[in-house]
Image (spheres, grey):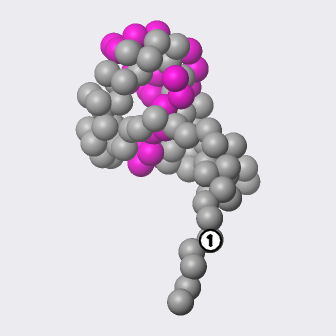
Amino acid sequence: MKILVRNLARATTEENLGALFAPFGVVQSCNLVLDKASGVSKGFGFVEMPKVGAAKAAIKALNNTMADGEKIRVKLAQNKAAVATESTSQAPKETS
């Protein structure tokens, strides 16, 4: 399961992020999103956990908690393709 973690401190590393989720189960991968020009964290990243139960427990326990001095937001990541499909498949609103 892919998890989105937002509002991370700029100093947070992928290792810190993985350690935060490790108590809940196996962490398959951790990726911080970096600014292409500066290489500095943009303040969000993704964690992948293979077990759904562990991922849901981590989301519930870690959402709105403090990490590296920042209150982080943790939720299930949405697939880009699914988000694009949802937004384009909505019928236009009728105006009268």
Circle 1 residues within 10 Å: few <14, some 14–19, many ≥20: few
Q: Residue visible at 36% across and 24% down? A: 56
Left or right: where 49 falls relative to 75: right
81 vs 61, nearest the viewer: 81
As for residue 3 lying within the magenta part, the answer is yes
Secondary structure beneath dot 1 equals loop
Task: Measuring from the top left, give residue 79's x and y in whole percent.
Answer: 62, 38
Left or right: where 25 falls relative to 46: left
Which residue position is annotated with label 1? 92
Task: Measuring from the top left, give residue 47's x and y in whole percent.
Answer: 51, 27
Q: Quadrant of residue 20?
A: top left
As for residue 2 lying within the magenta part, the answer is yes
Q: Give the range drawn in magenta.
A: 1-30
Task: Measuring from the top left, give residue 46's x and y in whole percent.
Answer: 54, 33
Q: Residue visible at 26% across and 28% down? A: 61
Residue reaching furthest to the right: 37
Residue reaching furthest to the bottom: 96
Question: Eyeballing the image, is 3 above or below 26?
Answer: below
Task: Measuring from the top left, give residue 29's x and y in whole percent.
Answer: 58, 20
Question: Eyeballing the image, is 24 above or below 73?
Answer: above
Left or right: where 8 falls relative to 1: left
Q: Residue visible at 61% across and 60% down? A: 90
Q: At label 1, which amino acid type do we have?
A: Pro
87 vs 59, nearest the viewer: 87
> Does residue 38 show up?
no
